[in-house]
Image (tube, rainbow, N blue to C red):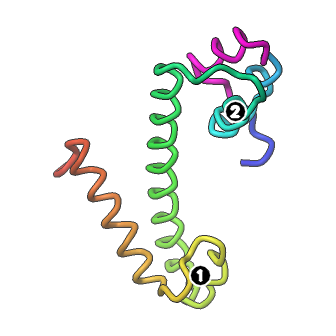
Amino acid sequence: MVGTRHGCPEPLKGWLEANGQDHLASAGLHPLVTFTLGAAQEGMPPLPADVLAGWALTLVNERVMLLQSTMAYLDRARRAGMSDPEITRSLDLVLPAGQTVTEYSAGLLAEVEDWRRRVGMVGR
């Protein structure tokens, strides 16, 4: 949500502070923004393994939340009476060109099921 303050994940915070980037560590940005900006700073040393692992975990978590939220949005939009063309317009920047809402929804469900299978959550 715009305006929401976020904390800087450890060990990214420690790495930023150790490399003179305290302002990024305390900026309250979304964690993915902080990872991206921190890694892009001129003259920064390579990211250590624990920071990279934290970044990867954040990517996975954000992707799962996006999938779940998008599926809930599609369900609620349909329950609210939105037509597929209305939903398509509302998701113009997300929905792949030429893909129907039904195809998109099926793809999301398949992705969630694949994720659940890979993390051992099948049947839960």
Question: Quick one: 27 or 89, which is closer to the camera?
Answer: 27
Q: Residue 35 carries which label?
A: none
**Depicted 68 relative to depicted 23: above or below:** below
At which x and y percent is residue 82?
Answer: 58, 85
Q: Residue 87 carries which label?
A: 1
Q: Do the residues labelled 1 and 2 touch (CB within 8 Å)?
A: no
Q: Quadrant of residue 5?
A: top right
At which x and y percent is residue 18?
Answer: 70, 8
At which x and y percent is residue 65?
Answer: 49, 49
**Element on which disc 2 rests:** helix
18 vs 116, left or right, is right
Q: Does the magenta stretch include residue 14?
A: yes
**Element on which disc 1 rests:** helix
Dot 2, how many residues are within 10 Å of its Cα: few (below 14), some (14-19), or many (20+)? many
Q: Is residue 75 magenta?
A: no
Q: Which mark is residue 34?
A: 2
| Residue under the image location 44 percent in, 77 percent down | 104
Give the amino acid type for the residue marked by disc 2 in the picture. Thr
**Depicted 28 relative to depicted 86: above or below:** above
Question: Quick one: 78 or 104, which is closer to the camera?
Answer: 104
| Residue under the image location 67 percent in, 31 percent down | 39
Give the amino acid type for the residue marked by disc 1 in the picture. Ile
Query: Label 1 to label 2, Cα distance in Å?
Result: 32 Å
The stretch of residues the image draws in magenta is: 6-21
